[in-house]
Every structure is written in C-alpha cells, then in structure tokens.
C-alpha cells in the first residue's frame, strides 16, 4: 500500500514536470494579452493550487476566486495556500459548479486530479492503461477511490464575483464537465470575462455527453474566438484559450 502510494505520487510528479514546458507557453501567451495590471482570476477545479501558484508567480493579483468540489482536496488547498503572500486576495469555495442547482455524485479517483462528476468508461483502453500504470505495487487496485454526493451550483449564483466588470481569466479544469459549467454562466456575466482557459478530453475514459464541436459552438455563440491551443503530453487532452471579441483591447 505504501509503495503504491509513493509510486502514484512519483507518477503524478513526472506528469507535472512533463507539463511544465506547456505551462511556460501558456503563461507567455497570457503575458502578451495582459500587461501591467492586477488580474482577476476565476479558478474552477483549483485542486491543490497549481494554477493559483503559477499565476501568482507571474502576475500581479487583484483577486482570485478558487473553486474545488472535493472536500479533502479543498482543505489541503486552503492549508497549502495559508502562508501564500496573496492569501488576503483569495476567496475559496468548496462546491461543484454546473448548469443548474442539483446534487451529483463526485467520483474521487486515486489520481485526484482526474476526479470528475462524469461517469467513467471503465472498459476504455485509456482507463485500463491508467489503472494498470497506477497499480504497479498493489493487486486488485481500483482507480475510483470513492463517490461523494456533492452540491452543484451555477457560477452566476456567486454575485460577488460578477460585481467586477472586468474579469481577466476564467480557467476551467474539471475533467469533462467544462461545457456544463459554461452553460451555468449568464450571458450578461460572460460579457465581463476577457479570456477563458479550458481543457477538452478526446480520450474515451470520461463520458462527457458532449463533443468539442459543442464546446466550439458555445464559444462562437457568445462571441469568443480561439487564440491558443496546446496538446498535453502523452494524453489525448488539449488546452484552449478563447478571447472575448468584444473585450479585445
């Protein structure tokens, strides 16, 4: 058990290192778009603060609104950031986000960065391969750790966020629940957002119930234009950045 946990941590650390070059390219893009100002960031799927740390190291921060649905990870997130120099500029929310108010089971995986509200296709090649890699030192290993009934709310219910007329970045990393979250934002609130940084899975492990064309149609319908995309290494996942055409400076 201990060996397997250590192996999982090593595996995830390796992925983080491999992703670092991508993150540098993403930060370079944002620096071209956002110059000499304090930024407002909405971080949905804040996990352990990876995005918060990345942006706080590279930008002046006015406000960050951090959402994390997994309570255990949420508590770890707050603890890890408790001594961060920007702690007074952080608002934390332990809630899931989606299109409407409801409760849904959150599937918490051993690899917590893959935790999702979506159902998993356990017969998919990607799922089986991932489970195999993470179970090197343990027999009968299961990728799903537990399921917890969790409250979901639309982002637009958080009025304190949209009191700001200029929100620089909305980042969504929620393992195939991205479109559900976008649909929970009122059009009047979307107009206040300059850049949306979102990922999309092309693997068959997650049953998203939508395709990339549906995501693209949403952005087209709301006057957002694709400005950047990059493939995550060794995964069928892309990260995209869309820009609000009506807020281009």
Image (cartoon, helix red, strand yellow):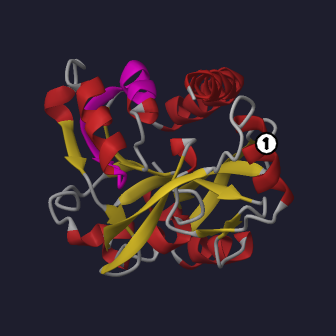
Name the foreground residue: 59 vs 67: 67
Is residue 126 among the parts visible in the rendering? yes
Please give the range of residues in magenta.
Answer: 53-70
Residue 210 pos. (x, y %): 66, 77
Is 215 placed above or below 68 here?
A: below
Specify whether residue 69 is painted magenta.
Answer: yes
Is residue 191 among the parts visible in the rendering? no
Q: Residue at x 51, y 38 (%)?
A: 33
Graded by Cα atoms within 10 Å as few (under 14), some (14 to 19) or many (20 or more), the crowding at tag 1 reads: some
46 to the left or right of 87: right
Q: Residue at x 54, y 43 (%)?
A: 113
Q: Residue at x 15, y 59 (%)?
A: 160
Q: Which residue is mark 1?
A: 132
Residue 95 pos. (x, y %): 29, 60
Residue 62 pos. (x, y %): 23, 35
In which image quadrant can residue 79 be found? Answer: top left
Specify whether residue 216 is painted magenta.
Answer: no
| Quadrant (top left, top right, bottom left, bottom right) of the N terminus | top right
């Amino acid at each position: 058990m201990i060996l397997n946990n250590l192996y999982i941590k090593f595996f995830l650390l390796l992925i983080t290192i491999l992703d670092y070059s991508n993150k540098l390219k993403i930060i370079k893009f944002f620096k071209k778009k956002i110059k000499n100002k304090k930024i407002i960031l909405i971080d949905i799927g804040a996990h352990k603060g990876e995005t918060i740390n990345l942006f706080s190291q590279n930008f002046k921060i006015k406000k960050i609104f951090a959402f994390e649905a997994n309570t255990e990870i949420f508590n770890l997130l707050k603890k890890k950031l408790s001594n961060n120099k920007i702690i007074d500029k952080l608002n934390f929310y332990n809630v899931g986000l989606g299109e409407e108010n409801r409760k849904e089971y959150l599937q918490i995986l051993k690899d917590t960065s893959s935790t999702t509200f979506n159902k998993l296709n356990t017969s998919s090649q990607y799922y089986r391969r991932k489970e195999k890699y993470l179970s090197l030192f343990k027999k009968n290993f299961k990728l799903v750790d537990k399921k917890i009934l969790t409250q979901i709310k639309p982002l637009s219910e958080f009025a304190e966020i949209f009191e700001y007329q200029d929100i620089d970045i909305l980042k969504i990393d929620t393992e195939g629940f991205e479109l559900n979250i976008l649909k929970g934002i009122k059009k009047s609130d979307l107009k206040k957002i300059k850049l949306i940084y979102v990922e999309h899975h092309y693997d068959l492990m997650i049953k998203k119930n939508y395709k990339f064309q549906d995501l693209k149609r949403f952005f087209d319908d709301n006057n957002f234009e694709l400005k950047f995309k990059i493939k995550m290494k060794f995964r069928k996942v892309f990260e995209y950045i869309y820009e609000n055409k009506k807020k281009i400076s």
